[in-house]
Image (cartoon, rainbow, N blue to C red):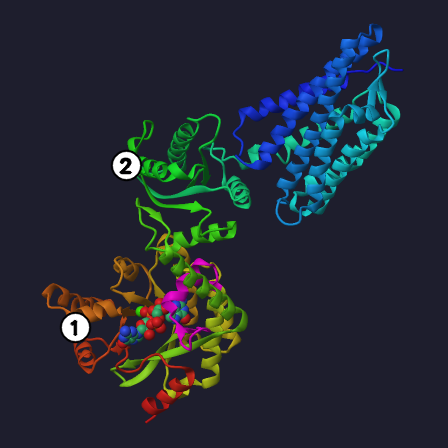
Amino acid sequence: MYRYDISFEVTSVCLLILMLSVMHTKRQLYILRNKMFYLGIYLFLALNMIDIVATVLVNHTIEMGSPWKTQFQYVLSIILFILQQATLQVFLTYVMVAFHKMRGRLLLYKFFNILTILDILAVSTDFIHKQLFYFDEMGVYSNGRLHFIVYLVPALFGLYGFVIVGMNKKKLPVLERHLITIIGIFTILVFMIQILLLPQYQVIYFWSTLVLASIFFTLQSSDYYLNRSTGAFNSEGLMVTMADKMQRKVPFSILLMSACDFEGIKDGFSTKNKQKVYRKIVSEILQRSTIKRKKRKMDVFRDDDKIYILFYDNVGAEYSAMKIGSWVTDGIYIDEIAPKVKVVATMLLFDFPGRIQTEEEFYSVIKYFMTDEYYKKYNVMQTINEEFFRKKKRYDDVRHLVEEAIRTDGIEMYYQPIYSSVRDDFHSAEALVRLRDKDSIGFVSPEEFIPIAEQEHLILQLEDLILRKICKFIQKANLQSLGVQYIEVNLSGNQCMQVDLADQLTDLIQEYDIPPNFINFEVTETSTIDSNNDYLLRNMRQLQSIGSTFALDDYGSGASNLKYLVDYPFEIVKLDKSIVWAYFGATNPKTRAVLPYSVRMLSKMNVRIVAEGVETLEQRNELIRLGVDYLQGYYFSKPICELDYLQFLREKNCS
Ligand code: C2E
Ligand code: CA
Ligand code: CA
């Protein structure tokens, strides 16, 4: 006969209360896993507290047994068993949810659910629970015939839980993986000690509390999901929340707000000020979300310049989204910075479940939205429609084609001859890439797939392929002997920004044994170049030092060409189709003046001028009269494949 000791339970209770109070000071993700974890902790706390009461009572009754006390003890013990079983069930569900095991084959899990029900029913039945435990005449707790079940059931639950964790260990961070192995080994040890050595102490409960605490401060730590500077959740938190809602098919709406500018701040916009604006937006949204305390209405996540707002009630979502959207774009009062800051943002609102079913689809829609200029309108609340998905599908298809082409060398180079009026021959050609469309017999336009390749970070691999194709052709076809002086090669904005571009190109030219002056690189002004112009200048200088030349492409289509012309050492300027056609189509004398004056200015700057888009004899003659020496366009030839280009050269240059 022994007296039971409650010191372990008392320590457990203190630790559990500490955990719960820490939990309440921090914002927690609104997901099933968290609900299960905290429900489990509350249950376990109750379990420990009742255990303390029961134990005190048992110790007490040893001295003075009385029938009503025995009755009370039975009731307490039954509640204890039920609570223990419920706690086990909740934590098992927690493990299942944490590893996304709630889908698919759940046979074993269902078996454990049934076990829980049976266990609770059994223990509530007078006859059966007496087989597990009973109180003797003295009021002393004694083991029944089937007492082993009291240990067997929790052991089974523990084992199954560890099997699931073990099978999914790879999903955990390394440190946590080791932690779980250690916990597993120790749990078996503690179990043995409890049964064999220390039955009068609740060692197992205390150990469980320690395990819960270690999970609480590592895997369950909410800090990992918080965006420190604003108090919103971060992108990790968004991912976890989305996964939770989608897997359980819980409906919600989401508003994406992507800020690109802030109006109303005069003295520049520092990161610190930016944080202030975001903090204000977040705190305001959080305030609105906690109007109804019991059920969370919305959540806010921040990922750089993007803010995601999740609405858990689909009905009011659209209205709330509109209100938030107009509040942010009309202007926010932030005293320390400026009286009113207007956020210029793109906004997209959509529902789940709807056209989007999985997390991958969600992120690809967001990504596509951010690239599509048509949908990406500022301060306009967009919703996605069929048209959006049609365009997105095309985008995905083209991206797939580019990936395929890179893998299987699936591009072709076409050449568009350039006419020299001085020499009256085709001294040069522009190399233009063609991507075969597998579904139709035709090609996908580079105007469509180059921007997609850039967006998807495939451009550098693609450009490498293009350059090799061109070099191989120049080397094999011996173009010099056919009167060609150089080939024009387009460089993308991304390419120009590469630090080692010049080295790469030099290597390539040497590898194929091509004279560097046989290549002229065409560069178009882009925003990428604009913000990092140092790189371009360095690359240009290095390549020019070995003999290559540069052309400024699409002159007259943008706005700030003059800056480029003055700042960069271009040898050639290519007049864009639009300014050429504007001259011929215009009735307005002002429009007609642009081309002649451009030509005169460029001649003064000593650059060679190429006019693009020459389609008629009249255009050819007029351009030559104005002083344009080099002409390119359908009038002379469309871009043609390698064989046709060689044939063209033999006919035109060698006769
Ligand atoms: P771009 O560099 O301005 O190329 C000239 C475009 O004008 C070519 O379109 C050409 O077929 C077209 N064109 C030429 N003459 C005429 C004409 O008389 N009338 C009309 N209507 N069009 C004419 P393409 O081949 O579709 O290429 C479109 C754009 O794609 C190019 O514009 C260039 O920016 C890009 N691109 C093409 N090939 C490459 C490449 O290998 N690398 C890179 N980075 N970009 C490329
Ligand atoms: Ca070009
Ligand atoms: Ca051009």
Amino acid bearing label 2: Asp
Kindly identify which residue carries mark 2: 330
Residue 494, image x and y in percent?
Answer: 42, 60
Q: Is residue 4 visible?
A: yes
Of 111 and 216, nearer the camera is: 111
Instruction: Say which element carries label 1.
Output: helix
Residue 613, image x and y in percent?
Answer: 26, 74
Q: Quadrant of residue 152?
A: top right
Q: Is residue 644 left or right of residue 78?
A: left
Q: CA distance from mark 2 to mark 1?
A: 45 Å
Query: What stretch of residues is rendered in magenta?
Result: 434-460
- Whether the magenta-drawn stretch holds residue 449 is answered as yes
Check whether the beta carbons of the residues at disc 2 and disc 1 lie within 8 A of each other.
no
Residue 241, image x and y in percent?
Answer: 52, 40
Residue 414, image x and y in percent?
Answer: 40, 78
Q: Is residue 549 visible?
A: no
Instruction: Say which element carries label 2.
Output: helix
**Label ID, residue 32:** none
- Whether the magenta-drawn stretch holds residue 134 is answered as no
Say few, some or many: other residues with alpha carbon within 10 Å of mark 1 (under 14 / 14 to 19 / 20 or more).
Answer: some
Kindly identify which residue carries mark 1: 584
Q: Is residue 211 left or right of residue 463?
A: right
Of 71 and 38, nearer the camera is: 71
In the rendered image, which quarter contains the C terminus?
Answer: bottom left
Q: Quadrant of residue 255?
A: top left
- Which residue in the rendered view is the most extreme toward the bottom? 655
- In this view, 450 is above or below 534: below
Indicate which disc, 2 or 1, sits on the residue closer to the N terminus: 2
- In this view, 530 is above or below 349: below
Of 585 and 47, nearer the camera is: 47
